[in-house]
Amino acid sequence: MRIVFMGTPDFAVPTLAALDEAGHEIVAVYTQPPRPAGRGKKEQKSPVHLEAEIRQLEVRHPESMKDIAAQARFMELEADMGVVAAYGQILPKTVLDAPQHGCINVHASILPQWRGAAPIQRAILAGDPVTGISIMRMEEGLDTGPVYATARTPIEDKTAGELHDELAEIGANLLVGTLIDFPAVRPVDQDDKEATYAKKIAKSEARLDWTKPAVRLEREVRAFAPFPGSWFEHDGQRVKVLRARVIGVNGAPGTVLDDQLTVACGNAALRLLDVQPAGKGVMSAEEYLRGRSVPVETVLR
């Protein structure tokens, strides 16, 4: 097929690579424009932009696909299909309808569950046992289109970062398989009554509230690892928690209960396993305690 690919972050890179290696003609790659990043605020190209350059594919990065000129250039490509994976822009109907077979999306949930911006994190926070990938036809609504294919994977004790990488590979393989005999694939309409919404993660959600049950906080730690990272304050310093385990003991919420950095929660306790003090690398709780005094009965904020 003649395919226009539209994606921006690391999640989209395996899909672009799989399409190219499967022999499809990638007539153009659309991605977000280079943005200032890092300490020097130097403009950096997106992961998809860099991958496309390695593969010697044409890259386009319009500020907005609502721009009439950008839409005209898109239509001139006369693509068979648009493939979208975490592009980061809302596509107008003109763009969605331009390719012969429309645009399809690689979405990181089992639709209609977790439509929206943060499906991986919201699935972990909800305690879902499984998540997955849906290949869906794009409509003007938010992730409302009919689904061509799904694949599932257990969540278990995986972090959002681990699930992200796993689902990126699953999505790439599922998409390529779906396109093998695409005209014969019949999409299934979603049941809107079963839909849930995965709103964007707010930075305020990442602060650990020790009055919550330990089970909930352990999910938050996994959902926000590696970014933005669940955190607490100790001696005026922010400390991220990247891995933790529920322990069946109780105490006043926020109180350190032992010399292994076990912190009492609203119900049960959370043993902190991997942490990251501000300005430092990730370290075990044992390493953290070697350099800092956190006596039993210390109250963390």
Image (cartoon, helix red, strand yellow):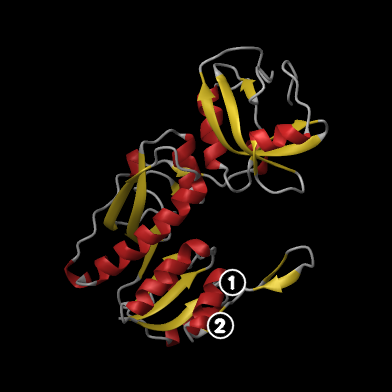
Distance CA(mark 1)–CA(mark 2):
10 Å
Corner quadrant of residue 102: bottom left
In the rendered image, residue 3, in percent from the top left (x then y), is placed at 37, 79
* Labelled pair 1, 2 in contact (Cβ < 8 Å): no
Per the rendering, the mark at residue 69 is 2
Q: Residue at x 65, y 18 (%)?
A: 258
Which residue is farthest top?
251
In the rendered image, residue 68, in percent from the top left (x then y), is placed at 55, 79
Left or right of 50? Residue 97 is: left
Seen in the picture, residue 189 relative to 122 is either above or below; the reply is: below
Left or right of 67? Residue 72 is: left
Could one spot residue 99 in this view of the protein?
Answer: no
Seen in the picture, residue 48 relative to 158 is either above or below; the reply is: below
Q: Which residue is mark 1?
A: 64
SS class, disc 1: loop
Q: How busy is the neighbourhood of tag 1: few (under 14 within 10 Å), some, or many (20 plus)?
A: some
Which residue is farthest right?
236
Q: Residue at x 67, y 40 (%)?
A: 240
The amino acid on which the numbered mark 2 sits, given as a three-letter code, is Ala
Could one spot residue 36 in this view of the protein?
Answer: yes
